[in-house]
Image (cartoon, rainbow, N blue to C red):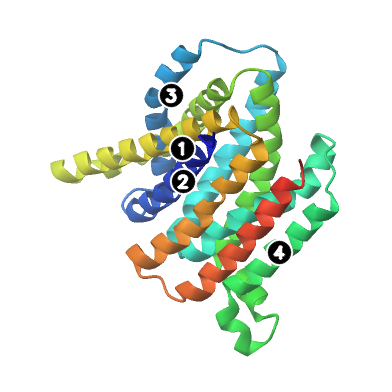
């Protein structure tokens, strides 16, 4: 049965909807506050699943991996929100597809995994997709899209996020292997709540505008937390039903969904060119993921 497939698609859908929610409310709340609030609101939804699972930490290396993971993810998630705030969804979010590209270099160093020829082919597609993502600038020269990518701070920042997440992904593998997927996810989110609290609490006054707005913002954070919890639960459940490469490949369809949401909800321009680029990048991600089989 392909029960894992709808779960992985649900994972991707929730990720793209979470991006939309961040884009909608990041102009009202600061990046640190919205990031901290989303992590905090994720925890209550995960607790019942952890209790139901009934297993815990199995090795002390869990804590070492957790420490570095929280530090890296704290920086990455702030950069992620900043990129969405300052640039179009359709040019920033697809940059996350570069994470497998960086994994081709970080994984051999950190966990001894080396790329195959198929993996290299996937890298070429990711680079080609980044070109198509900015194809509207081609009239200024064939290298113009890459120069535009460097000029726009949002995609550039998101590429930094992709690199940091390529390191964190290796730590995730250590963490999951020394506990359970849900315990690891809960621990990382709890760690984010602690590390981001000083920045977030300095901006908590942003909630106190009007009564209706305050409750509306709190509800938005709860919605983001729910989407995050559903996304993580669906992903981890799907991983128990099939190969990791299949689940992560389907999850990356969130980049395409984000491009669609950017055009439909925020009226972002050049949707057709950007969608083509996102699809080519996605094809590269699929090849990279499957090359590890």
Q: Marks 3/2: CA distance?
A: 16 Å
Number of the label disc, if any, that sits on residue 231 = 1
The mark found on residue 286 in the picture is none
Q: Which residue is labeled 4 in the image?
A: 125
Q: Is 241 displayed left or right of 90 in the figure?
A: right
Q: Are marks 1 and 4 in contact (CB under 8 Å)?
A: no
Residue that mark 2 sits on: 15
Left or right of residue 25, residue 55 in this image: right
Report how far apart the C-alphas of labels 1 and 4 lie in the structure.
27 Å
Are circles 4 and 3 on residues that touch, CB within 8 Å?
no
Distance from Cα at disc 3 to Cα at disc 1 = 11 Å
Distance Cα–Cα, label 1 vs label 2: 6 Å
In percent of width and height, residue 275 lies at: 51, 68
The residue identified by callout 3 is 46
Rendering quarter of residue 242 = top right
| Residue 129 higher or lower than 57, as above or below | below
């Amino acid at each position: 049965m392909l029960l894992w497939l709808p779960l992985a698609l649900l994972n991707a859908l929730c990720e793209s909807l979470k991006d939309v929610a961040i884009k909608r409310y990041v102009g009202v709340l600061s990046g640190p506050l919205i990031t901290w609030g989303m992590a905090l609101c994720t925890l209550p939804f995960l607790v019942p699943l952890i209790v139901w699972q009934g297993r815990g930490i199995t090795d002390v290396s869990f804590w070492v991996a957790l420490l570095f993971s929280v530090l890296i993810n704290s920086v990455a998630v702030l950069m992620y929100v900043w990129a969405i705030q300052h640039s179009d969804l359709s040019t920033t979010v697809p940059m996350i597809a570069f994470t497998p590209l960086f994994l081709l270099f970080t994984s051999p160093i950190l966990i001894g995994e080396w790329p195959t020829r198929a993996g290299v082919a996937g890298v070429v597609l990711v680079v080609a997709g980044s070109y198509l993502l900015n194809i509207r600038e081609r009239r200024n020269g064939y290298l113009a899209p890459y120069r535009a990518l460097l000029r726009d701070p949002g995609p550039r920042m998101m590429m930094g996020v992709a690199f940091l997440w390529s390191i964190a992904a290796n730590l995730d593998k250590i963490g999951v292997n020394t506990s359970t997927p849900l315990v690891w996810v809960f621990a990382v989110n709890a760690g984010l709540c602690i590390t981001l609290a000083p920045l977030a609490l300095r901006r908590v006054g942003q909630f106190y505008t009007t009564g209706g707005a305050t409750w509306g913002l709190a509800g938005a954070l709860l919605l983001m937390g729910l989407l995050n919890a559903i996304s993580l639960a669906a992903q981890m459940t799907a991983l128990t039903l099939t190969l990791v490469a299949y689940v992560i490949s389907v999850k990356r369809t969130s980049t395409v969904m984000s491009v669609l949401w950017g055009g439909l909800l925020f009226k972002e321009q050049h949707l057709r060119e950007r969608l083509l680029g996102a699809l080519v990048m996605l094809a590269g991600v699929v090849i990279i993921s499957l090359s590890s089989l």
